[in-house]
């Protein structure tokens, strides 16, 4: 069960800016992309560290109290990181492309919603009964199900924000290129 939780978390919950492109670019768009990418990179590292902490605590010999403490801190860290990314995208304003205002607003809303979802997962983990192994495992199963849904719903608006010229511009930013490397969970 713990392995499923880690795999689900790593598979769907990490912000990945899958970016590429080498065109010459637009200076205003490049400036926008740089401001977003520079703000996102430290938050992506925070998310990656939270994922790594959960993965380290997924062995079958881990004590429920340790798993609970690690997961709660990881979910709080992820909530904080997604909130900060949403603020960075909001502060950057709309990218200077057709439909940029809607794309930016949708991405900010999604990021804030994702932050709230992780805060809710932290509350769920904090409320698990660590004295009863069966109840604890059932609670982790419920959390894994929530994580799976969160991962599937997760990055639609971000993907739309990164389409076309915006994605190409972000792909040219060194700080966004570093964001794309994320840890993966074992099975």
Image: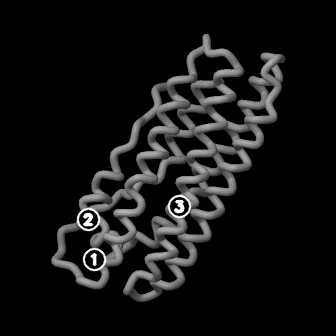
Q: Secondary structure at mark 3?
A: helix
Q: What colour-coding does the image apply?
A: one colour
Question: Looking at the rendered structure, which numbered label has been put on residue 30?
Answer: 1
Q: Nearer the viewer, mark 3 or mark 1?
A: 3
Whole-angstrom CA distance, mark 2 to mark 1, is 8 Å
**Residue pictured at 76% horizontal, 35% vertical:** 126
Q: Residues within 10 Å of mark 2 (few under 14, many from 20)?
A: many
Residue contact between numbered discs 2 and 1, judged by CB atoms under 8 Å? yes
First-in-chain label (3 vs 1): 1
Whole-angstrom CA distance, mark 3 to mark 1, is 21 Å
Tell me the quarter of the picture where residue 141 sits.
top right
Q: Secondary structure at mark 2?
A: loop
Front-most of residues 162 and 124: 124
Q: Residues within 10 Å of mark 1 (few under 14, many from 20)?
A: many
**Residue pictured at 48% horizontal, 66% vertical:** 158
| 34 sits left or right of 106 in the view | left
User: What is the quadrant of the N terminus in the image?
Assistant: top right
**Residue pictured at 78% horizontal, 21% vertical:** 130
First-in-chain label (3 vs 2): 3
**Residue pictured at 53% horizontal, 53% vertical:** 81
Q: Secondary structure at mark 1?
A: helix
Task: Please give the residue where the numbered disc 3 appears in the rendered image.
Answer: 84
| 55 sits left or right of 140 in the view | left
The location of residue 34, given as percent across then percent down, is 31, 70
Task: Please give the residue where the numbered disc 2 appears in the rendered image.
Answer: 173
């Amino acid at each position: 069960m713990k392995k499923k939780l880690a795999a689900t978390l790593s598979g769907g919950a990490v912000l990945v800016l899958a970016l590429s492109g080498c065109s010459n670019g637009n200076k205003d768009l490049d400036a926008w992309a740089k401001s977003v990418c520079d703000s996102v990179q430290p938050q992506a590292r925070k998310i990656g560290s939270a994922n790594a902490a959960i993965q380290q605590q997924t062995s079958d010999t881990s004590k429920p109290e340790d798993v609970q403490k690690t997961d709660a801190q990881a979910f709080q860290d992820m909530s904080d990181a997604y909130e900060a990314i949403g603020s960075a995208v909001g502060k950057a304003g709309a990218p200077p492309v057709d439909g940029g205002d809607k794309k930016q607003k949708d991405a900010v809303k999604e990021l804030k919603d994702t932050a709230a979802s992780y805060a809710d997962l932290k509350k769920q983990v904090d409320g698990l009964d660590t004295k009863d192994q069966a109840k604890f495992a059932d609670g982790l199963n419920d959390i894994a199900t929530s994580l799976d849904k969160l991962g599937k719903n997760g990055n639609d608006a971000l993907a739309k924000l990164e389409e076309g010229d915006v994605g190409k511009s972000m792909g040219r930013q060194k700080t966004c290129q570093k964001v794309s490397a994320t840890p993966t969970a074992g099975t």
